[in-house]
Image (spheres, helix red, strand yellow):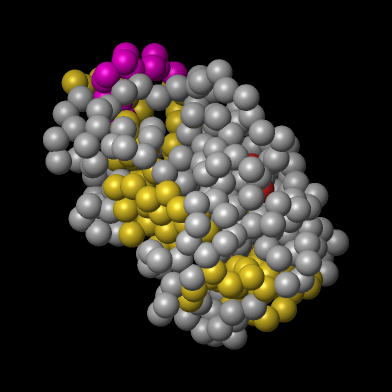
Amino acid sequence: MNKKTSKRPAQGRFKLWFMTAALLMTVSLAADARGIAASGSFFSFGLQDQLLSSCTPQHKRADFNGDCKTDVSVFIQNNPGFWSYYTSPSPNTNRVSFQFGQSGDIATPGDYNGDGTTDAAVFRPGVGTWYIATNTVGGFYGVSFGQSGDIPVARDYDGDGTTDFAVFRPSNGYWYILNSSNSSVSYVQFGQSGDRVVPDDYDNDGKANIAVFRPSNTTWYIRRPDGSFDSISFGLTSDWPVQADYDGDSKSDVAVFRPSTGYWYVRRPDGTLYGGPHGQSGDRPVPGDYDGDGKADFAVQRPDGGTWYILNSSTGIVTTFSPVDLGFPIPGGYLTPLY
C-alpha cells in the first residue's frame, strides 16, 4: 500500500485532490460555495475532540441522535434535496427535516467528525465532490476526493472512530482512501469492474475491510490487514449484498437479500447459514440495529408507499412505520448503491 501525506487545508479553504494510480497531488483553492450545495460555507475537515458512544460502528448505521439505534431516515433527491429522520418509533414523531443535497447525489452517511452520531453527507458523482452537513440550518463543508465514475465507499478504515472519505474506481479496480487520522491517502487495487463494493469490519479490529462481491461468480473477496484475502462463495448473481453484524459479535456477516423472493440469507462464521422471508419483490433492504440490542435487524422499505417493515431481532416482532417523507432510505447508504 502506498501513501502520500499532505497538510490539512486551512480554515475556510476547499480541499481538492487529483488522483491517479501512480500519482496523488493536493492543492488548496479558495472556497466558492455558489450553486454547489445548500447555503453554507466550506471549511477544513479533521478530527475533533469528541466523546464516542460505546456502540461499535456496525451498530451505528444512520444513528443521528447517538442512542445506538438505527433511525428511520430518508434522502429526498430533489432540487434542492431534503433529509428527514425520526428518533422515535411512534409514527412521524420527533421528526427532523432539513434541506441538503440535490438530485443525482448519492447518500453517504457516516460519522465524519467523530462525535458518535451520524452526519448527513452526499457524494456528487459527476464532479467527485463530497458535501457534509454540519447542522440542520444550512451549514456544510465540501471535500473534492474522487472523479466522475467513482463509487463512494466511506468507512472508518484507519480505526480512529471517524468516517474516512473513500472511493472505488471500477475502471482500474483501485480503492482510494483519505485517512482522517493523519490526512494521508492510501490506495489499493482490489476488485474489478462489475464488482459490488461491500466494505465493513469483518474481523472486529475496529477498521473496515476492503471487500467486494463479484456477481459473475457469486464470490465475496475480503481483504485482510496483511494484504491477503478471504474468498467466500455465497449468494446468487441477482442477490443484493446486505453485510451487517446480525449475531452481535461485532463482526460484519456475509449476507444477501434476494429481491425476487424477499428472502434474507446470512452466513455464520462456521460456514452454515440462516435467514428467512422478510419482504417482497421490489422492496429495498435497509438492515440496521433499530432496537438497540447490538444485532442488525432485517428491514425493508417498500418504495410504492414508503412503508418500513422492521423485524426486531430482540423480540421477533415486525414493526411497521410509514413516514410522511418518501425518499431514498439512508440506512441503504451503507450498502452498494443499487437503487
Point 20% across, 55% down: residue = 79
Residue 57 shown left or right of residue 179 in the figure: right
As for residue 14 lying within the magenta part, the answer is yes
As for residue 205 lying within the magenta part, the answer is no
Viewer-nearest residue: 143 or 102: 102
- Residue 206, above or below 43: below
Image coordinates of residue 210 in percent, x first then y, are 58, 46
**Given the current orientation, which residue lies at the most extreme right position?**
270
Viewer-nearest residue: 238 or 306: 306
Residue 286 seen by the camera: yes
- Residue 248, above or below 132: below
Q: How many marks?
A: 0
**Given the current orientation, which residue lies at the most extreme left position?**
34
Image coordinates of residue 159 in percent, x first then y, are 63, 31
Quarter that holds the C terminus? bottom left
Point 20% across, 25% down: residue = 31
- Residue 274, above or below 76: below
Point 25% across, 28% down: residue = 41
Point 64% across, 43% down: residue = 67
Image coordinates of residue 302 in percent, x first then y, are 48, 76
Residue 55 shown left or right of residue 66 in the figure: right
Quarter that holds the N terminus? top right
> Hey, which quadrant is residue 269 in on the image?
bottom right
Q: Which residues are magenta?
A: 5-19
> Hey, which quadrant is residue 256 in on the image?
bottom right
